[in-house]
């Protein structure tokens, strides 16, 4: 602060008040928010009890729990592949997903990776990756095929998952782990803001599982994409997650970092000490 020359030697008791207090950065708005979202199936089964959950950019969240805990239901409610029977799903960019048009817009920015890969075996890895671009094409544009820029994007995505040399290989000639990495490349080519992965390593051996989860974590950190993965393997959750959301009987019973997952909490998630 510059003092008046007449008072240069006199401490300014009002100086502190004159300097604005340092502002703390406003908290980043979550990319997705569930407000009281619950799912009851037509047969009366409660798959997900009313749930509140925020998801952040650049965070790898693992939904952890045994079969039937509600992991897949929660994951699929994030892009409304499972429609909530109560509550609201909110996107930072769109708001409440309250119409089919808004849901379609949200899904264009939300990539999904499935346990069973969902690839077309007779097509090459590159062609399978390119299918993720169809959601950004109009009907007439789809008939014209993919642009050179989209083909370069597909190759770049395959390169990021270590499969550049397999670009022209049919997917039914790839191993299970390689097929899942093609699925990740396909998700990347969608240029998403969030990636959802439903039990992506359930059918893979430990080496392939760790490679797939490592690729997902690298993408999460390098691209600042929110990645949500459902798993039942505790060791992978501890190794790769920033945040673990533990579920039991359709309810969240834990939400925190892996080191905070103690034996009593594991007993609540799995029913017995893990």
Image: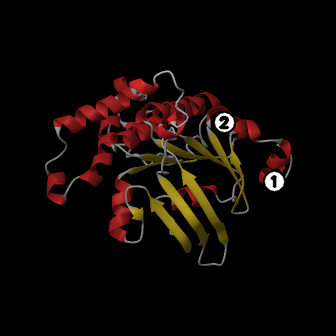
Where is residue 58 drawn, in percent x and y?
A: 49, 39
Left or right of residue 54: residue 20 = left
Report the residue at 49% width, 64% height from top: 89
Dot 1: element: helix
Where is residue 53 drawn, in percent x and y?
A: 59, 57
Left or right of residue 39: residue 56 = left
| Residue 45, above or below 130 | below
Q: Which residue is mark 1?
A: 268
Q: Which residue is mark 2?
A: 236
| Residue 101, above or below 206 | below
Report the residue at 85% width, 47% height from top: 264
Calculate the distance from the C-alpha at mark 1 to the C-alpha at mark 2. 19 Å
Which residue is at the front of the view, 242 or 5? 5
Tell me if I can see residue 92 in this picture: yes
Which residue is at the front of the view, 71 or 11? 11
Q: Quadrant of the C terminus?
A: top right
Report the residue at 66% width, 36% height from top: 236
Label 1 or label 2, whichever comes before in sequence order: 2
Report the residue at 15% width, 53% height from top: 141
Which residue is at the front of the view, 200 or 7? 7
Label 2 Cα neighbours within 10 Å, binned few <14 / some 14-19 / many ≥20? some
Residue 232: numbered disc: none
Where is residue 46 drawn, in percent x and y?
A: 67, 71
Disc nearest the viewer among 1 and 2? 1
Dot 2: element: helix
Where is residue 171 drawn, in percent x and y?
A: 39, 37
Circles 1, 2 touching at the beta carbon (< 8 Å): no
């Amino acid at each position: 602060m510059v003092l008046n020359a007449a008072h240069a030697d006199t401490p300014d008791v009002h100086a502190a008040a004159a300097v604005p207090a340092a502002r703390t950065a406003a908290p980043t708005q979550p990319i997705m928010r569930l407000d009281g979202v619950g799912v009851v199936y037509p047969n009366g089964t409660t798959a997900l009890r009313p749930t509140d959950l925020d998801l952040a950019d650049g965070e790898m969240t693992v939904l952890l729990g045994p079969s039937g805990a509600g992991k897949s239901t929660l994951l699929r409610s994030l892009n409304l592949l499972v429609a909530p029977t109560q509550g609201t799903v909110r996107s930072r960019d769109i708001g409440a997903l309250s119409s089919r048009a808004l849901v379609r817009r949200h899904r264009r920015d939300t990539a999904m990776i499935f346990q069973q890969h969902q690839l077309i075996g007779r097509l090459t890895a590159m062609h399978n990756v390119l299918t993720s671009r169809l959601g950004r094409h109009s009907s007439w544009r789809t008939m014209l095929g993919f642009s050179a820029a989209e083909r370069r994007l597909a190759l770049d995505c395959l390169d990021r998952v270590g499969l550049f040399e397999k670009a022209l290989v049919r997917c039914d000639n790839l191993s299970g782990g390689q097929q899942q990495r093609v699925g990740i490349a396909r998700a990347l080519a969608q240029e998403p803001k969030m990636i959802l992965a439903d039990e992506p390593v359930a059918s893979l051996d430990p080496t392939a599982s760790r490679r797939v989860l490592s690729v997902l974590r690298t993408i999460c950190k390098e691209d600042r994409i929110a990645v949500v993965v459902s798993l039942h393997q505790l060791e992978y959750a501890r190794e790769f997650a920033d945040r673990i959301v533990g579920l039991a009987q359709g309810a969240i019973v834990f939400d925190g970092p892996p080191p905070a997952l103690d034996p009593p909490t594991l007993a609540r998630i799995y029913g017995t000490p893990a």
